[in-house]
Structure formats: structure tokens, C-alpha cells
Image (tube, rainbow, N blue to C red):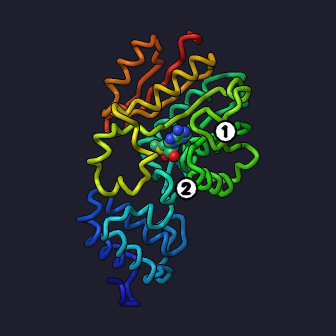
Amino acid sequence: MLNNVHLSKLEIKKRLLEKLNTISGNQAEQESQIMISYSAKKENYLDVNNGEIDKELINKILNERIKGKPLAKIINEKGFWKNIFYTDDYTLDPRADSEILVEHILNDCTQIKNKKKFNFLDLCCGTGCLGISIIDELENSFCDFIDISKKALNACKKNIIKFEKQKNSKLFHSDLFENYPINRLKNIDVIVCNPPYIPTSNYLSLNNETLYDPRISLDGGELGLDYYIKIIDYLINVKFKGSLYFEIDPIISENMYKYLLEKGIKIVYKKVDYLSLDRLIKITLPNNN
Ligand SMILES: C[S@@+](CC[C@H](N)C(=O)[O-])C[C@H]1O[C@@H](n2cnc3c(N)ncnc32)[C@H](O)[C@@H]1O
């Protein structure tokens, strides 16, 4: 498609958009820019000059994209918050929807006067995009990362190295809290968690692109609440004193609120995302009220 060697950056973008409009819809503009900057080995589209774009590479990416593979899974990169994260076949590609967790955790932490050092736990960390984005903005803070998938932890480790957070991070290969030392939990101020939450029956009818993410990152059991319930039960049992920020989704929110009410758990606040969809709840546990 881009065999003409004399094409300018804008001409390449125009041709990409012609192809991407039908595949990527309202993401076409953004995807064309990402393809161009990636093929020119630049972080930012605006920094790409004519003649710097590897057209063979862009053709290869476009051919895979046309077959339906998500762009992030082709180039192994996804922008999240203020950075570009490594992602692969074993991780959920970071979603813009989840940035609201970073935003509110940072907002809350910076309002706490006289506290200069926070300990976070990114539970079900995948690429580590949540925990890394948070500690990247809070000097001296530390984050533990837990995932059941060794391969996802590998991706998280790559990102920790990429963003030079080795001294502020520790990885735990664990089925939720199974291999996580309880003594460490006592020092955690904030748990951030985006667990698998798609109800199994909905998982089976997800669109093809979402199915490129591993099932273990999506399927949340019959009602989509399996992980929340296990996590909350455990934390109540060990009398966790910190704050808990969960990503949620309209697909589960009503059942989630019902469950929390039954358990007598206080919702500190709920937030909707940029599409006005239920996306975040902050809770504290009964022993903490
Ligand atoms: C929805 S993804 C979230 C990834 C990342 N935190 C994000 O927001 O992009 C859920 C993650 O939970 C992990 N996971 C699934 N079951 C788990 C378990 N029992 N214990 C720990 N992690 C688990 C998956 O491997 C996946 O990386």
C-alpha cells in the first residue's frame, strides 16, 4: 500500500486512514499516528519527519491490523497515563478507562498532609500500568505487584525496568494473596486492583479484538464478582486497614453494590469514566470504619 518511496508523512497518514476508518472507527486517527511514530522509532507523532518512516514495517503492521489483530498486540506497546507500556499476548492491554484509578489515587494521596511515602499494592497487575504510573508520580513511594501469570509478571518486570522503578518495586507470583506475606500487607496504604470481571456468559460473546487478551485477565466467573468477593473476604479476615480502589464496570456494578451493602462495606466514593460509565469504587472495610 505504501510502496511509493516519495510519500510524505501526511500522505502516508491519509492512506492509513482510508484503510483504518472501517476497522478502527473513532480510533483510526490515533492508530494512524501510533503506526507512523512506531515505524519511525519515535515516541511522538509530531516528532516524525518525512523520510523517517519505515514503510515496509508500516505495511506489515497494517496487514495484521486489517486481519483484526489489535494494534497494541501487533507492536507490543500501549500508551497509558503518561507513558508507553510494553504489552504482549499474556497481558491485558492497558485501557484508557483504567486511568481514572491513577487519577483519583494520586489526587487522594497528595491531599494527605505530612505523609511523604506511600506503599501500594497493585493486585492483578498485568503489565503493571496502574502501580507503575502511580509510583512514577509520587516520589519515594513503593509498589508490590501480584499476578497469577508468570508471563504477565515478566511483562510487568520489563515495564519496571523500562521506567527505572526497580528500587521501588517487588513482584510476587501469587494466586491473589496466597504467596503474599501478610507482614507486607500490614504496611500497605493503598491497594489498587483491576481484577477479571467479565461474567463468564458475556466473555463468550466478547468482540474478536477483546478476545486477543488472555481469558485469565477477563473472565470473572458467573456474575463477574468472583475476584472481588475473594479479595474482600480475605482483607476483612486479616483486618486490612488501608484503602481499596477497584476498577468496576456497568456490567457488574449493580450486583457489586448489592454485595457491598450486604457485607456492610462502606463505599467512600464511586466514579464514572469519560463515557459516564461506572468505573471506580473506593472502599474501606468494616473493621476500619
Ligand atoms: C483485568 S487484568 C488487569 C491488568 C492490569 N492491572 C490493568 O489494569 O491493565 C487482570 C489481571 O489479573 C490476573 N489474575 C487473574 N487471576 C488472578 C489471580 N487468581 N491472582 C492474581 N492475579 C490474577 C491476570 O493474569 C491479569 O493480568
**9, above or below 222, in the image:** below
| Residue that appears at 38% across and 61% down | 70
Q: Which residue is mark 2?
A: 85
Looking at the image, which is closer to me, 88 or 2? 88
Residue 119 placement (x, y as % from top left): 68, 32
Give the vertical position of 162 relative to 130 (above or below): below
Do the CB atoms of the residues marked 2 and 1 lie less than 8 Å apart?
no
What kind of element bears circle 2?
strand
Residue 78 in the figure: left or right of residue 200: right
Tag 2: amino acid: Phe
Image depth: mark 2 or mark 1 in front: 1
Q: What amino acid does circle 1 point to?
A: Asp
Position above or below: 281 against 124: above
Residue 272 spot, x, y in % from top left? 37, 32
Residue 147: image quadrant is: top right
- Residue labelled with disc 1: 144
